[in-house]
Structure formats: structure tokens, C-alpha cells
């Protein structure tokens, strides 16, 4: 068997959580491979809304195994709060949620370092989620990290050594902080974590594949936030692209099957950094209002703009996307005209490839299409799609060279339409 991967093609918040939940019945296992509680994946069904941060979005459909892979960074305090809330709402997880021993722990001092580094950057700050993501991955790569498996071996000593090093850095930055409450909650989180299955997830996943079981890998963030290919330095600190599923779960590249690339019918970004199609007018405000574009983790207002096909083509290429999924179609229901950026003008010259630097002087070139002016939220099948909506889908498919197989027309699990296939 192969693993399928579902990942974001834009700057995150494309709707990954919703679609992973929708697709879960087709799989035996759902696994997260990177990121951490910087993610906020929203699911809605039966009148309930859930936001997941570290727990995979396959947790609500039957008793599927969900795995937190080695590529993930885990904050025990936030994990405890998330897991306890789920258990309290009638979704037991202890038997179904497996955690890689190789996943790195976000320490309380990682969160403080995140804030200290951001403060030191001043106007150049990244606008991180403040969850300690960058400092934790930094320690991982510099071989100073503490892993989930360490909880069972000489933990106090390992924790103490890393904490002492962090405290020295914070002192050198003259950064004032109070660790008491954070550390207390964190230690309680460590105790709580011990009830879960710590696994060698690379063996587990490969054994599932050998036994003919199907695995869906759930990406966090989006391709434009990838540490290598995103809008550096305004990115997160992990590989959010498809290759991240290989390193973040121990899956060989030739084991990758379908790659589901998910995007919004428009585009959003939260935090700082370049965004060529960003709108600063009432059209952007309208997208924000109709799309409820506020961060599910931080509550920050998301910046909004038209779809950027130059960036999307780049994402499709980097990830080897085999199937596209378009989200939040309904948000554009009332627009007279829909714009799509098909090229950038840089120094007066038109380019259709994603350049090294999009920080300055990139002007979007737009194609315009008629809006569909129809309420999409009640649609049950693609037979009901208005002509203009079909024209938009066809236009995007032609531009991106990949078929759009799923269209989302509202936040609820049920508001999801699979398109006919001719395979
Ligand atoms: P993720 O991080 O990729 O899982 O996405 P988020 O959950 O952060 O953000 C997506 C938001 O859009 C959530 O509030 C979803 O409930 C909502 N959403 C998902 N699909 C649709 C859709 O088709 N239409 C509308 N209006 N909202 C949607
Ligand atoms: P999901 O999985 C949107 C952004 C932050 C910031 C940058 C770095 O819900 O799509 P970090 O805390 O990772 O060091 O922040 O990345 N960011 C996200 N934006 N969705 C996310 O996750 C994000 N995770 C991080 O806003 O600009
Ligand atoms: Mg999100």
C-alpha cells in the first residue's frame, strides 16, 4: 500500500482539518508529520465545532488509529488541554492516539524564546503563533532537543540541561519572563502524556502498509510557509511540503500515493510577510467578513486577497499534487467578478514563474471571470453548479494542470462535494 498526503498549497488555513475528517472513513490510519500547536484545524459536524492543534483530524471518524509522527513538535501542556477537552466531549483517544518517541518536545522556555526572538526583531518580526515552534526545531537541528522518548529515560536531567541553556540565552537578551505557571502546566502535561502509547511510528506506519492498511498523512501550515520553499524568512520552521511526510513519518518516497493539494478559492495569510495579491480595500474586507477569516489559534485577522496562480503552480510542482481540492467557494458567492493572478510584473517585465524574492516590486497580473452569484452552501452535487462556477473550476484546472476533485461549499462536514471522475 501507499500513503496519501493532504497538504496546504497556500499560506495555511486552507481547510485541511475539514477535508481530512471527510476523507478519514476511506483510511485505516491518519498521521500528522510536521508542525505542532501552531496549527489550528477546524472541523464542524452535527452542530459542533472543534479546533485541533496537535491531534490529527482523523480522531472523530470511527476508531481509526491516529499518529503524531516524529516530524511533529509537541507541547505537553497544550496537548493535555486539547486531549482532555476532546475526552470530555465524548471522544476518547487514549487507545487510538499513538505518539512517536522521536517527536520533539516544546519546552516552556522554547515559548519564551519565541517571544524574545520576535521582540528582538522589532518591525522585522515574523508574526509567529508564539508557540515555540522555531526554537524547538532549532534545538532539534542543532542536536539539543528533548524528545517524547526521553520522558522515560533520565528526563529530569535532560530537561534541566536544556532549560539552563535557554535561561542563559534569555539572560543575554535581557528578556524578562516568569516561568512558574508555564512550567507547572508543562510538568502536568508530561505526567498526562505518560498515559498514551509512545511508539516507533516509522515501524508502525510501515507495518500498516505491509499489512495492506491505508494511511492518510495530514499536513499542517501550507507550502508557502515551508522552511525551504516558502516566503523565507516569513515561514514556519518545518518542511510543510510533501517530502515532509517522508521525513516526518519515515515513509520512503516511493511509498507516496495520491497527493491532495488543498487551496481556498481566494487566498489568505496570517502573520507578516509578502502576499502579492493582498487586498487593502473593501473587497478584501468582504472576503474577511464572509470567510470569517480570523486565526483559529491566535484569533488574529487573516489578510485576504485574490487567488495567486503563480504561487499555486509552484506549490503544485513542489508537492507533485495529483488531486486538487478547492475550499470556501461559497465565500465568493456574492462577488460580481472573480480575479485570479496569472502572472507577476517584476521591474516592468511579466513573469509566470515564482521568483526567488517576492518581498518587493511584485505586481499581480489578473485574469477576470464572471462571478456565479448563487448560494453554493446548499449544493448537494456538481450537477447543481452554476455555469460561471464550472467555468472558474475549468479555468483553474487548465492553469494548474491538475483536476479539482473535491469542492467545499461551507464549513460543515456535509458541505463537501466530490466531483465525478473519469478514471
Ligand atoms: P486548516 O488549518 O487548513 O485546517 O484550516 P482552518 O480550520 O484554520 O481554517 C479554515 C476555516 O474555514 C475554518 O474556520 C473552517 O471551518 C472554515 N471552512 C472550511 N471549509 C469551508 C468552506 O467551504 N466554506 C466556508 N465558508 N468555510 C469553510
Ligand atoms: P494551519 O495548520 C496559518 C504562520 C504564522 C507566522 C509563521 C511562523 O492551521 O494551516 P510559527 O508559529 O510557525 O513559527 O509562525 O507561520 N503559521 C500559520 N499560518 N496557518 C497555520 O497553520 C500556521 N502555522 C504557522 O502566522 O506567520
Ligand atoms: Mg488553521
Image (cartoon, helix red, strand yellow):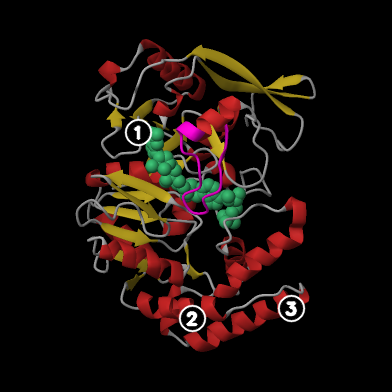
Read off the residue under disc 2.
184
Q: Considering only vertical position in the picture, is 60 above or below 323?
A: below
What x and y, as percent, mark residue 263?
46, 34
Q: CA separation, marks 2 and 3?
A: 21 Å
Asked whether residue 381 appears in the rendered view, the answer is yes
* Label located before the other in sequence (2 or 3): 3
- Where, quadrant-wise, is the C terminus in this rendering? top left
Classify the position of ligand 1 by quadrant: top left, top right, bottom left or bottom right: top left
Which mark is in front, 3 or 1?
Answer: 1
Please identify the quarter of the rendering in which residue 114 is found. bottom right
Q: Is 301 covered by the magenta stretch?
A: yes
Q: Nearer the viewer, residue 250 or 42?
A: 42
What x and y, as percent, mark residue 144?
60, 75
* Label located before the other in sequence (3 or 1): 3
Q: Is mark 1 within 8 Å of ligand 1?
A: yes
Read off the residue under disc 3.
171
Q: Nearer the viewer, residue 310 or 410?
A: 410
The circle drawn on residue 410 is 1
Amino acid at each position: 500500500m501507499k500513503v496519501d498526503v493532504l497538504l496546504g498549497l497556500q499560506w495555511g488555513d486552507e481547510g485541511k482539518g475539514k477535508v481530512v475528517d471527510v476523507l478519514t472513513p476511506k483510511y485505516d490510519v491518519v498521521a500528522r508529520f510536521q508542525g505542532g500547536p501552531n496549527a489550528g484545524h477546524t472541523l464542524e459536524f452535527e452542530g459542533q465545532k472543534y479546533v485541533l492543534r496537535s491531534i490529527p483530524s482523523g480522531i472523530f471518524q470511527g476508531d481509526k488509529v491516529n499518529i503524531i509522527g516524529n516530524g511533529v513538535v509537541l507541547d505537553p501542556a497544550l496537548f493535555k488541554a486539547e486531549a482532555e477537552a476532546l475526552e470530555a466531549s465524548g471522544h476518547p483517544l487514549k487507545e487510538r492516539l499513538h505518539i512517536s518517541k522521536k517527536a520533539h518536545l516544546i519546552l516552556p522556555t522554547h515559548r519564551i524564546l519565541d517571544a524574545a526572538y520576535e521582540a528582538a526583531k522589532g518591525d522585522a518580526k515574523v508574526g509567529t503563533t508564539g508557540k515555540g515552534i522555531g526554537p524547538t526545531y532549532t534545538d532539534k537541528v542543532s542536536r539539543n532537543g528533548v524528545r517524547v522518548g526521553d520522558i522515560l529515560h533520565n528526563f529530569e536531567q535532560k530537561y534541566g540541561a536544556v532549560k539552563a541553556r535557554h535561561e542563559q540565552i534569555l539572560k543575554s537578551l535581557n528578556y524578562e519572563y516568569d516561568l512558574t505557571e508555564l512550567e507547572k502546566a508543562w510538568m502536568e502535561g508530561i505526567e498526562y502524556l505518560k498515559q498514551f502509547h509512545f511508539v516507533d511510528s516509522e515501524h508502525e506506519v510501515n507495518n500498516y502498509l505491509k499489512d495492506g492498511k491505508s494511511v492518510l498523512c495530514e499536513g499542517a501550515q501550507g507550502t508557502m510557509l515551508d522552511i525551504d520553499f516558502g516566503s523565507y524568512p516569513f515561514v514556519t520552521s518545518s518542511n510543510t511540503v510533501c517530502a515532509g511526510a517522508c521525513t516526518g513519518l519515515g515513509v520512503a518516497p516511493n511509498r507516496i500515493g495520491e497527493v491532495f493539494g488543498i487551496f481556498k478559492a481566494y487566498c489568505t495569510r496570517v502573520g507578516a510577510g509578502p502576499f502579492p495579491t493582498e487586498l487593502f480595500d473593501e473587497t478584501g474586507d468582504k472576503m474577511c467578513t464572509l470567510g470569517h477569516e480570523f486565526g483559529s489559534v491566535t484569533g488574529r485577522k487573516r489578510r485576504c486577497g485574490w487567488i495567486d496562480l503563480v504561487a499555486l503552480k509552484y506549490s503544485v510542482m513542489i508537492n507533485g499534487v495529483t488531486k486538487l481540492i478547492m475550499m470556501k467557494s461559497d465565500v465568493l458567492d456574492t462577488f460580481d467578478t472573480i480575479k485570479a493572478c496569472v502572472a507577476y510584473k517584476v521591474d516592468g517585465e511579466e513573469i509566470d514563474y515564482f521568483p526567488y524574492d517576492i518581498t518587493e516590486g511584485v505586481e499581480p497580473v489578473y485574469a477576470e471571470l464572471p462571478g456565479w452569484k448563487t448560494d453554493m452552501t446548499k449544493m448537494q452535487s456538481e450537477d447543481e453548479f452554476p455555469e460561471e462556477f464550472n467555468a472558474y473550476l475549468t479555468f483553474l484546472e487548465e492553469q494548474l494542470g491538475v483536476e479539482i476533485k473535491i469542492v467545499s461549499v461551507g464549513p460543515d462536514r456535509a458541505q463537501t462535494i466530490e466531483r465525478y471522475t473519469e478514471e
